[in-house]
Image (tube, rainbow, N blue to C red):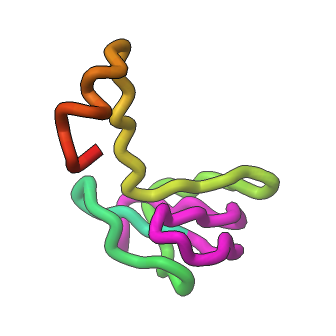
Amino acid sequence: MIDLAIRGGTVVDGTGAPRRAADVGIHGGAIVALGDVPAATREVDATGHIVAPGFVDIHSHSALTLLADPRV
């Protein structure tokens, strides 16, 4: 059994792939399932919401970061 299932949301994974309806399963703080997610200890209904698993916010108050770090 996984720790958390986020069900019914629209997944935007950040790869450039089209958004799609899918469930996301999390166990031990890591994404372990996408699409067909087994039963979970806790479930969240994300119907009508965007789910962005693994999203990393590179927010900075300095525009210099965009120029100084090529990984941005």
Asked where in the image residue 63 lies, by quadrant, the reply is top left
Residue sitting nearer the eye, 59 or 2: 59
Residue 38 position within the rendered picture, expressed as x and y whole percent measured from the top left = 48, 80
Which stretch did the figure color magenta? 1-23
Task: Classify 46 as above or below 5.
Answer: above
In the current view of this chain or complex, which residue is farthest to the front? 67
Residue sitting nearer the eye, 44 or 57: 57
Q: Left of 9 or right of it: where is 56?
A: left
Asked where in the image residue 45 lies, by quadrant, the reply is bottom right
Q: Quadrant of the N terminus?
A: bottom left
Q: Left of 27 or right of it: where is 11?
A: right
Q: Left of 67 or right of it: where is 18?
A: right
Tell me the residue at 54%/86% (across/down): 36
Answer whether residue 16 is magenta in the image: yes
Answer whether residue 66 is magenta in the image: no
Residue sitting nearer the eye, 46 or 67: 67
Residue 20 position within the rendered picture, expressed as x and y whole percent measured from the top left = 68, 75
Task: Classify 29 as above or below 17.
Answer: above
In the current view of this chain or complex, which residue is farthest to the right? 48
Tell me the residue at 58%/71% (across/down): 23
Q: Left of 21 or right of it: where is 62?
A: left
Asked where in the image residue 21 lies, by quadrant, the reply is bottom right
